[in-house]
Image (cartoon, rainbow, N blue to C red):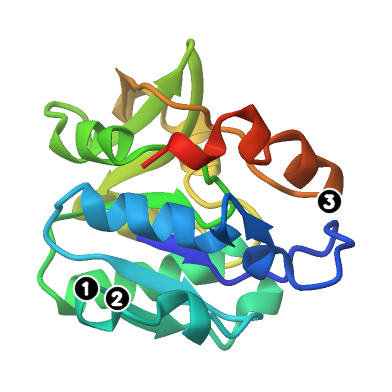
């Protein structure tokens, strides 16, 4: 599941953050393509503030798009909308990543998705916990329904549920125009697939 519902209010570029050019394609396209290339059971893309039709053009048969009408209430509403869809699809777990993390490769999504043992599995990058995170369906009811935190709050509250998987890639997220410039293709983004 790629969470791509927020407005990216700290981003002050000429276009919405998720549509900003990054490595020759819109920023959100990187996370969506990585999720697709991870070859997990299905890819759910949760949209909201920004029309991602242009980003999703050409991969409509590879993704299930969920519109989160409550995106203004925080990331947790996008997570909940995506999990509701995963439940309808009969999924036992969901691997959740962010649409503004262009440098997380498919291998990280795959490693988290295939990890065994814990009910919540988070990627680690050089020892730091960052998305993607796999959530077993038994923990879905424990997640907040509103607010700006997805699984972080659950991981703090129930650390005994959490396992870690070391992953390659860079978990940097693009929140500002300065972030976009910092992680632009000149820093290696164009080669990440």
Q: Give the CA distance from mark 3 to mark 1.
A: 30 Å
Task: Judge left or right: residue 153 versus residue 169.
Answer: right
Of the numbered discs 3 and 1, the one sitting upstream in the chain is 1
Q: Secondary structure at mark 3?
A: helix
Q: Residue at x 13, y 26 (%)?
A: 117
**In this rendering, does residue 145 appear at all?**
no
Placement of the N terminus among the 4 image quadrants: bottom left
Measuring from the top left, give residue 116's x and y in whole percent: 12, 28
- Badge 1: how crowded within 10 Å, few (<14), some, or many (20+)? some
Label 3: how many Cα within 10 Å (few below 14, some 14–19, many 20+)? some
Q: x, y (%) of residue 26? A: 58, 64
What is the distance, in whole Å, between disc 2 and disc 3 at their CAs?
A: 27 Å
**Above or below, comparing residue 26 to residue 46 in the picture:** above
Q: Quadrant of residue 12?
A: bottom right
Q: Which residue is mark 3?
A: 177
Determine which residue is flagged by label 2.
Answer: 59
What residue is rendered at 52% in x and 52% in y?
150
Residue 145 got which mark? none
**Residue located 68% across and 41% down the image:** 184
For label 1, the residue is 62
Closest to the observer, 155 or 186: 186
Callouts 2 and 1 close, C-beta under 8 Å: yes
User: Dot 1 lies on which element?
Assistant: helix
Q: Is residue 121 left or right of residue 71?
A: left
* Vertical side of 48 occupied by 100: above or below: above
């Amino acid at each position: 599941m790629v969470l791509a519902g927020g407005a990216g209010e700290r981003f002050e570029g000429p276009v919405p953050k998720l549509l900003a050019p990054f490595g020759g394609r819109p920023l959100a396209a990187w996370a969506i393509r990585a999720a697709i290339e991870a070859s997990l059971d299905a890819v759910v893309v949760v949209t909201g503030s920004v029309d991602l039709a242009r980003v999703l053009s050409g991969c409509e048969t590879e993704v299930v798009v969920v519109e989160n009408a409550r995106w203004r209430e925080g990331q947790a509403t996008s997570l909940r909308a995506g999990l509701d869809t995963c439940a309808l699809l009969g999924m036992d777990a969901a691997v959740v990543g962010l649409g503004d993390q262009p440098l997380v490769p498919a291998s990280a999504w795959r490693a988290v998705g295939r990890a065994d043992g814990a009910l919540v599995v988070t990627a680690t990058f050089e020892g730091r916990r960052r998305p993607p995170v796999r959530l077993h369906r038994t923990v879905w009811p424990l997640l907040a329904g509103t607010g700006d935190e997805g699984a972080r709050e659950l991981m703090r509250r129930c650390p005994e549920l959490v396992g870690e998987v070391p992953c390659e890639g860079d978990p940097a997220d693009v929140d500002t125009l300065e972030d976009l410039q910092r992680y632009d293709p000149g820093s290696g983004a164009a080669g990440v697939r």
